[in-house]
Image (cartoon, rainbow, N blue to C red):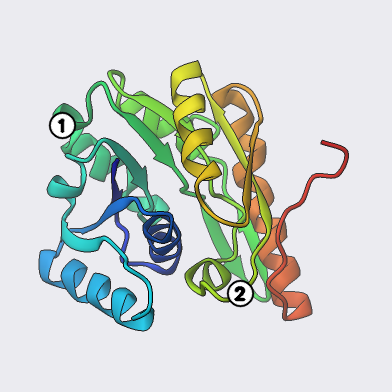
Amino acid sequence: MHVGILGGTGPAGRGVAVRLAEAGIRVTIGSRDAERAATVAAEVVARWPDSDLGLGGAENAEAAAADLVVLATPWESAVPTVRSLREVLAGKVVVSMVNALVKEGREMLALIPPRGSMSAAVQAALPESLVAAAFHHLPASEMENLESGLEADVLVCSDYPEATAATVALVEQMPGLRPLDAGSLSQAAAIEAFTAVCITLNIKHKAHSTLRIAGL
């Protein structure tokens, strides 16, 4: 499988990229700047010389040509980015990990997008794609560190069963992560907003906590 990560040069995108690559999946980190994407990919690979990471960098358009695409851009540019790639993303599973957040003092606050969640906004911009929401509550620094011993649950939601199944199967290949089907895309509003709580807790307690659901 080949996974492309749109806007993958930031901490969140890099974290997902290296974990997927560690699992033996070919990954293309995308960016508006192909040179920056290639530099970031090379830096990630160089950090783990003992791992055979199939990780490269390219423009977002090339990353969008992958079998499955993860959206990791800042929230302000998420919809414009996917809208410009609408044709190449048609028929594909697109996993949004975008959160609309703003920092105020030492707290992170959730914004409410016009459609209730960024995932819903992405789905509206990509009517011919199968959008899922996932990867929202993961501490980026722990994801990017393959020696962190990270263990976390990943909530997955989508209006398309095949998108949920594909995303769950992807997460299952990533060591330390357990996917949980959280229902339809309407759940994304609560899932995305809760990310603000997770980050605020980590800021307050100087920690890198993860989400674990007991009883399942």
Circle 2 residues within 10 Å: few <14, some 14–19, many ≥20: few
Which residue is located at x 17 percent, y 37 percent?
85
Q: Which mark is residue 148?
A: 2
Labelled pair 1, 2 in contact (Cβ < 8 Å): no
Q: Is residue 30 above or below residue 150?
A: above
Q: Is residue 76 above or below residue 182?
A: below
Quadrant for the C terminus in the image: top right
**How far across and down, in percent of the image, does residue 25 sit?**
34, 50
Closer to the camera, 88 or 149? 149
The mark lying in front, picked from 1 and 2, is 2
**Left or right placement of residue 216 versus residue 87 in this view:** right
Distance Cα–Cα, label 1 vs label 2 = 36 Å
Closer to the camera, 126 or 57? 57
Provide the residue designation for mark 1.
Answer: 88
Closer to the camera, 22 or 61? 22
Asked whether residue 114 is in view, the answer is no
**How far across and down, in percent of the image, does residue 125 sit?**
31, 28
Which residue is located at x 23 percent, y 76 percent?
42
Disc 2 residue type?
Answer: Ser
Q: Is residue 122 above or below residue 43?
A: above
**How far across and down, in percent of the image, does residue 187 sit?**
63, 29
Residue 28, quarter of picture: bottom left
Q: Is residue 169 above or below residue 173?
A: above
**Left or right placement of residue 52 versus residue 61 in this view:** right
Disc 1 residue type?
Answer: Val
